[in-house]
Image (cartoon, grey):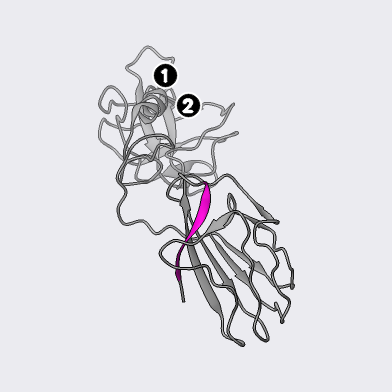
Amino acid sequence: MAPNRYYTSYGVSTTFQTGVNASATTFILNGPLTNWPTSYPFTVLCDWQSGTTPEVCTITQAATGSGPYTFANVIRGVDGPAGVAHAVTTGTCVPGFSARDFTEPQAHMAASAAVHGLAGTVVGNTDGMTLSNKRVTKRVLALSAASATPAINTDLYDVVHITAQGSTAITSFTSGLTGTPVDGDTLRVSITGSGAVALTWGASFEAGTIALPTTTVATKRLDVGFIWDSDASMWKCAGTV
């Protein structure tokens, strides 16, 4: 998302080479444009320290010419008084800022929707909210080396694929298991071997209405799904396929 406007810390004031009326959208400035922004849009302050009525304008595109400099499509009277006339030679123009540069961030800090280019509401990490049109991508761990005690951290992964297990028996899924699951968490584990792989789940896993599988079948991939049983503090088998 591009910035609303660009700035400079010490742009030098210049004068109008040709006077402008209250509605002209082309500024011809004498220059030089010392330390003026080179990205657009940016704010200029016209006649800001003169005895005439000042005006805030927006420069929307690069100037043509090498002095004088012609800025087309200037937006007039953007933050305060409407456009006013500026005199040839004595009229001044300098990059700057105005009230909008302070009111916009204040409005942003107070907003709970349509910020950072989003159309919807900002999601808070502890707020009760209903989300729609969202896809949550599962965190996947691929273990490609045979292990009797695969290392699985359920704080980091939702899906674990154990491949290249060969025929090495898995003697405990609990031994290498870490994480602090909470109610509603799910875990899916798949095991693929070059032959039948014996499976021992250990104390962190339990059967539900579906028994814990004790072996894979030949070279077929076995998928086992679990939900966290917060009452028993165990991963309960919810299905196999």
83 displayed left or right of 135: left
Neighbours of disc 2 within 10 Å: few (<14), some (14-19), many (20+): many
Q: Judge from the rendering whether residue 153 lies leftward or rightward of residue 88; answer left or right.
A: right
In terms of secondary structure, where does tag 2 sit?
loop
Residue identifier under label 2: 96
Residue 19, picture quadrant: top left
Q: Secondary structure at mark 1?
A: loop
Residue 98 or residue 135, whichever sits in front: 135
Q: Is residue 91 visible?
A: no
User: Residue at coordinates 47% horizontally, 26% vertically from top-left?
Assistant: 96
| Numbered disc in front, either 2 or 1 | 2
Residue 7: % across, % down: 52, 33
Vertically, is 189 above or below 13? below
- Which residue position is annotated with label 1? 48
What's the mark number on residue 108? none
| Whether residue 160 can be seen here | yes
The residue located at (53%, 35%) in the rendering is: 31
Label 2–label 1 contact, CB within 8 A:
yes
In the image, residue 173 lies at what x, y percent? Answer: 65, 61
In primary-sequence order, the first of circles 2 and 1 is 1
Left-right relation of 158 to 91: right
Magenta stretch, main secondary structure, is strand
Instruction: Examine the rendered structure and indicate whether residue 147 appears above or below residue 218.
Output: above
Whether residue 237 appears in magenta in the rendering, the answer is yes
Span shown in magenta: 233-239
Q: Mark 2 belongs to which amino acid?
A: Gly
Nearest the camera: 182 or 39? 182
